């Protein structure tokens, strides 16, 4: 039951109606017996600064940030974490004594999701390839680089976006003749492109390029088994979907706000 003592957290985006974070967090709050409520807030870009100021004024505890605000919201924070600075995006705000702390839980969420399965791990010292060059790709690239992979190839439909993502890294367009070899030589392929959500769309790469020893990680969580994951399974690859990343990035935010480690199984079941 909501009272004057209930702590408020939530998520902002435009749109935000599709977010599954409220059901995930509210289930975890109930499981932990915490007097918190997680609310989705539809905030348009022109209203972002006013919304953040309003949250601060009414003592909101924390806010998750989704598209299209992850970069613009940096202007409203007091300080940001190393991960958020490297990624160039903030997905979690924490309000403490008049200060606003910005963080990015996507990068550690990627690693926790990949490593929670004992049969998978980040291939330290090996090659990895990331499909896409948007905000999620930024988090994945930073996570893999900090963990110690040997090289990261960024493949994107628009080469300019891949170039802007990381000048020191190899990058190519999805039609580049080097792409088949890059896929074959990678021990980890991470897809961040949202085209995986549409089962009618062709794969961004040829399944024939995939090797059985490659881990294929599709961070898209709808559908639970994407066409890329299905094709990779048929090629003998280990695969992982996006639910784990959603759960673990949310769990990290949950703990930042409450000081309590949530039950990730409850969060996963809620999704």
Image (tube, helix red, strand yellow):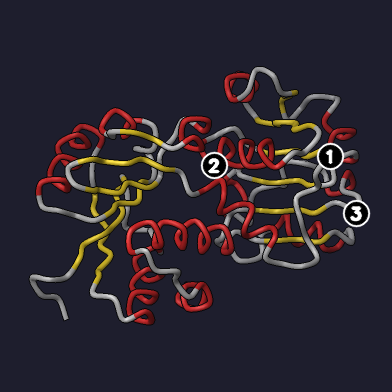
* SS for callout 2: helix
Figure quadrant of residue 47: top left
Look at the numbered discs 1 and 3 and tell me whether their residues touch, using CB distance below 8 Å: no
- Disc 2 marks which residue? 136
Query: Which residue occupies 45% across, 60% down?
Result: 250
Nearest to the observer: residue 201 or residue 90 = 90
Circle 3 packing at 10 Å, graded few (<14), some (14-19), many (20+), is some
Nearest to the observer: residue 120 or residue 160 = 120
Nearest to the observer: residue 245 or residue 271 = 245
* SS for callout 3: loop
> What whole-number distance in Å separates the C-alpha atoms at marks 3 and 2?
24 Å
Left-right relation of 72 to 127: left
- Disc 1 marks which residue? 125
* SS for callout 1: loop
- Disc 3 marks which residue? 213
Query: Which residue occupies 63% across, 60% down?
Result: 113
Q: Is residue 51 above or below residue 75?
A: below
């Amino acid at each position: 039951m909501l009272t004057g003592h209930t702590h408020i957290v939530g998520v902002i985006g435009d749109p935000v109606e599709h977010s599954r974070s409220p059901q995930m967090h509210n289930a975890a709050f109930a499981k932990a017996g915490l007097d918190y409520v997680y609310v989705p807030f539809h905030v348009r870009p022109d209203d972002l600064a006013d919304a953040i100021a309003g949250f601060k004024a009414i003592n909101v505890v924390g806010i998750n940030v989704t598209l299209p605000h992850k970069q613009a919201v940096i202007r409203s924070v007091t300080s940001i974490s190393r991960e958020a600075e490297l990624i160039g995006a903030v997905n979690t705000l924490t309000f403490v004594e008049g200060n606003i702390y910005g963080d990015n839980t996507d990068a550690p969420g990627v690693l926790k999701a990949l490593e929670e399965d004992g049969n998978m791990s980040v291939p330290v010292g090996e090659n990895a390839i990331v499909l896409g060059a948007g905000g999620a790709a930024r988090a994945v690239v930073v996570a893999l680089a900090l963990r110690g992979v040997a090289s990261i190839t960024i493949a994107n439909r628009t080469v300019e976006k891949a170039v802007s993502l990381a000048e020191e890294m190899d990058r190519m367009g999805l039609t580049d003749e080097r792409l088949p070899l890059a896929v074959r030589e990678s021990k980890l392929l991470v897809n961040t492109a949202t085209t995986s959500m549409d089962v009618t769309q062709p794969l961004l790469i040829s399944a024939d390029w995939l090797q059985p020893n490659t881990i294929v990680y599709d961070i898209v969580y709808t559908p639970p088994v994407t066409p890329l994951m299905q094709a990779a399974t048929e090629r003998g690859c280990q695969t992982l979907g996006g639910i784990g990343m959603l759960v673990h990035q949310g769990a990290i935010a949950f703990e930042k706000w409450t000081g309590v480690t949530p039950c990730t199984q409850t969060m996963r079941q809620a999704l």
